[in-house]
Amino acid sequence: MLRSRYEAVIVGGGHNGLVAAAYLARAGRRVLVLERLGHVGGLAVSARAFPGVDARLSRYSYLVSLLPSKVVADLGLRIALRRRRYASYTPVGDTGLLVDNGDAARTAASFARVTGGTGELEAWRRFYGMTADVAERVAPTLLEPLADRTAMRSLVGEEAWRDLFERPVGEVVDERFADDTVRGVVLTDALIGTFADPSDPGLLANRCLLYHVIGDGTGDWNVPVGGMGAVSGALADAARAAGAEILTGAEVLAVDPSGEVAFRDADGEHTVTGERILANVPPAVLARLLGDAGPVPEGAQLKVNMVLSRLPRLRDPGVDPAAAFSGTFHINEGRDQLARAYAEASAGRIPSLPPAEVYCHSLTDPSILGPELREAGAHTMTLFGLHMPARLFREDPAGAREAALRATLASMNAVLAEPVEDCLLRAPDGSPCLEAKTPVDLETEAGLPGGHIFHRDLSWPYGEPGRWGVETAFERVLLCGAGARRGGGVSGIPGHNAAMALLT
């Protein structure tokens, strides 16, 4: 039986809501989590996407970087995050740029082969030395009350402030690097899930880059063992063990600033009251629940999930496909290619050569495959396509999805030694193990306005001192999802900060 009153009612059972629930319940608060879907985790879930195929895909979100080790320790989470040996591989003609975290000499040789000298590698080391220093300094502040702009500037130092916080990252990259391929590799971290021109003075791409390099003080992007669902599952276990009530299949219908929450489940419509309401939903959804109409953001990505019978062959005979695909495999993401794709998408056209990147999580975590698939040499493959804004899919969602997928696979095949379609595993019914999700699909299936994976454009990690970045215009309503300040990605940071705003 549900109570009629709680100290905290959390709207949405995604990973941030579960973090908030676990912290609050551990502090002795009465907590209720209401989740519309039949499962918790939001987009941080694992799924067997293809009938009869024993492969657990991280269907939506797929890597972990921003989740602080402090949150993992505080909540006693039983999760394992594996660092990838290879950071990235970028095909260039019949060779490619391999960044090997375990072999500095091999990385240097690859840079020399692709760029013709040592200058780009030296520039690379200087740039990422700077971002590593920023990561070490800024990451701890993400779990503290907000610092103001002046304090953040003092913390990171003048060089980093100028090149990451004040100048468009596109200009910085063009100044620091000369090679088009290297420039593109750096810039992709400024464009993941973000439709932006990296030279725009609005600095949206800068904010995206910042969150991609500061994760947990290292910037590493790790593979969760068991898939993303293992992270959400551990968080749900922690919340329930601490006494939080989690109700799935419960769609919130309205939120009143006084603390009243109306929801519907299989038994009908109900109302509960919370001393505080923590909204683990996009700001546009919260606005609607409050009876308002907030601005709708725009997502800009194509997500393609695949299961392969084997890894594709590369044009580069000196690199094992297992090395190339275990890190980030860049596809037509040179500086000029990114700019051309952005211009085409801005004009309302699917890019002619879509930039994208792929990852084979099963190379790092074979446990997501069943024993028979492992023995047969099968692998999962996740593709993330850039510059695919929701506007391209509004008029004809199915037709545009098919066109975008066709163009993206052609883009990938242009850098491989064989078509990736030849490597797709077939399900028992004969269908290829491939699915594509557009921003409109995420809007329809997951309730994300505009299909924006960060809920809205990312914000700077500083603001009004003394606040937590989760406050809203209503005293009893806090934002604990990715749309909070210092939100975005699978981090749990907004959930932690909303709980701290209530507890401190």
Image (spheres, rainbow, N blue to C red):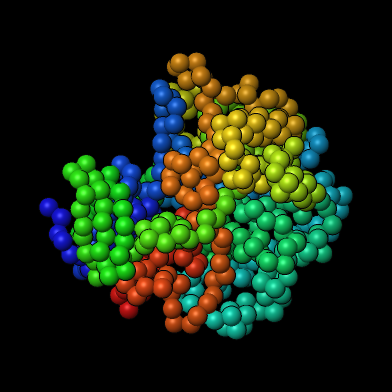
- Residue shown at the point (21%, 49%) measured from the top left: 269
Find residue 223 and report its horizontal and vertical position in percent: 50, 47
- Residue shown at the point (56%, 35%) measured from the top left: 397
> Is 156 in front, or is 446?
446
Find residue 68 and report its horizontal and vertical position in percent: 45, 63
- The answer to whether residue 131 of the structure is visible from this angle is yes
Relative to 238, is 186 on the left or the right?
Answer: right
Find residue 486 and report its horizontal and vertical position in percent: 50, 67
Q: Quadrant of residue 400?
A: top right
How many numbered marks, from 0 up?
A: 0
> Quarter of the image containing the C terminus?
bottom left
In this picture, is 189 found above or below 130? Answer: above
> Is 175 in front, or is 406?
406
Relative to 224, is 273 on the left or the right?
Answer: left
In this picture, is 35 found above or below 164? Answer: above
- Residue shown at the point (33%, 44%) measured from the top left: 37
- Residue shown at the point (36%, 58%) measured from the top left: 289
Find residue 196 and report its horizontal and vertical position in percent: 67, 56
> Is 103 in front, or is 275?
275
- The answer to whether residue 239 of the structure is visible from this angle is no
